[in-house]
Amino acid sequence: MSDKPQIRPLMVMLFIGLPILAVVITPLWAWYAGFTGTQWLIALAFLYLNGLGITAGYHRLWAHKAYQAHPVVRFWFAVWGAGALQNSVFVWASDHRRHHRHVDDNDHDPYSAGRGLWFSHIGWMLRDYTTNTEDFSNIKDLLQDPILQWQHKHYVAITAFMNIALPIGIGVLLGDIMGTLISVGLVRLVVNHNVTFFINSLAHYWGTRPYTEANSARDNGFLAFLTYGEGYHNYHHIFQTDYRNGIRWWQWDPTKWLIFGLSKVGLCWNLVRVDNFKIQRAIMDTTFERARRQLDQHDNCPLREMLEHEYAAFSESVRQWRELQSQRYEKHKEALGEVWTQRRAQLQQRWEQTQLRDQLKLLELNLRNQQRRVQLLLEQSQSLAAA
Ligand SMILES: [Zn+2]
Ligand SMILES: [Zn+2]
């Protein structure tokens, strides 16, 4: 007898059975009855509504508290997220917080990439693994939310309504119940499942690691395109509270754009953005580490001295930045603590703040220039290794 944990038949049906059914039934239906463009457009809309319910709601709002949202938005994400059939927010967020806390630890990370691509994609849900044991002690902040309590309690009913009743209703309106059930119900569900699961599987295997090499998470623009912006997973694992995953304006992150847009109309607030200097510092730390490792392969390499020189300059920038930050904090406290009656004093205060801000900006710029120099150094040492 196998000593593997017990199989979960319902999960096998959902995650193995439904994809097989979709692959068989969709071409047959397309051949014998045919789908309409409208059906596929509605399926695409559902795909995005489900996907964003998970990424903007389940993930960034609830699991990471990257921002706060109006009850209407929370209700919307709770309903569409449930429609994605990935369990209630309580279960999802609790698992996900464990994933971040114990990333790559095969005994504690529920979908540890260390246990293989298949396991981290779907395999982890198919058996009663000990890492799946429900433990809500890490989501105490969410347990009090009445919308989430309602969603958890009625999860099966909500998800049945979103995945069966709603597509049937639309099918009645379009005059083709079966075709709509296949396209908007089945195909959309299977596609959404698998693209979301790419974040746990492929985004821990394939891509670059510009911000940290401490875990297996990768940045991957192609995966970001498929996963509503969640493919910048290396950034996300080091700065998980940031409401953005793709931090550059051009990086494909519709989840970030949605949250930002909602904040502009007052439906979201307190969006967390990690300081640019801290981000740049993480990039530098990783580049230095990589360069050191590379140079360690050669004895007495002249580049080594240059690298250490750059590192000293980098440490000095970090020290100055910390000092400026604490000065800024002090000034801010002063401004809050005292009642400023004189106009002159106010102007003085504002001028000092501007000075500090400019100095911080300059430091950030210095770091960016240094990043280029170290990158060059790294490339030189790589060509040295190749020679
Ligand atoms: Zn991850
Ligand atoms: Zn996360």
Image (cartoon, grey):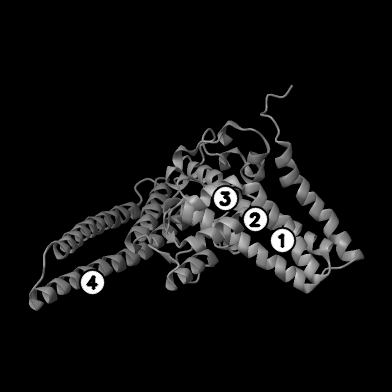
Please state which amino acid type lies under the numbered disc 2.
Gly
Mark 1 residue CB less than 8 A from any atom of ligand 2: no
Residue at numbered disc 2: 83
Q: Earlier in the sequence, mark 4 or mark 2?
A: 2
Q: Earlier in the sequence, mark 2 or mark 1?
A: 2
Residue at numbered disc 4: 358
Quarter that holds the N terminus: top right
In space, the residues marked 2 and 1 are separated at their CA atoms by 10 Å
**Residue 91 in the image: x percent, y percent?**
55, 43
Q: Which of 319 and 169 lies nearest the eye of the viewer?
A: 169
In space, the residues marked 4 and 2 are separated at their CA atoms by 48 Å
Q: The residue tagged with tag 1: helix, strand or loop? A: helix
**Residue 151 has which mark?**
3
On screen, residue 58 versus residue 30, left or right, reads left
Q: Earlier in the sequence, mark 3 or mark 2?
A: 2
**Residue 373 in the image: x percent, y percent?**
35, 64
Q: The residue tagged with tag 3: helix, strand or loop? A: helix
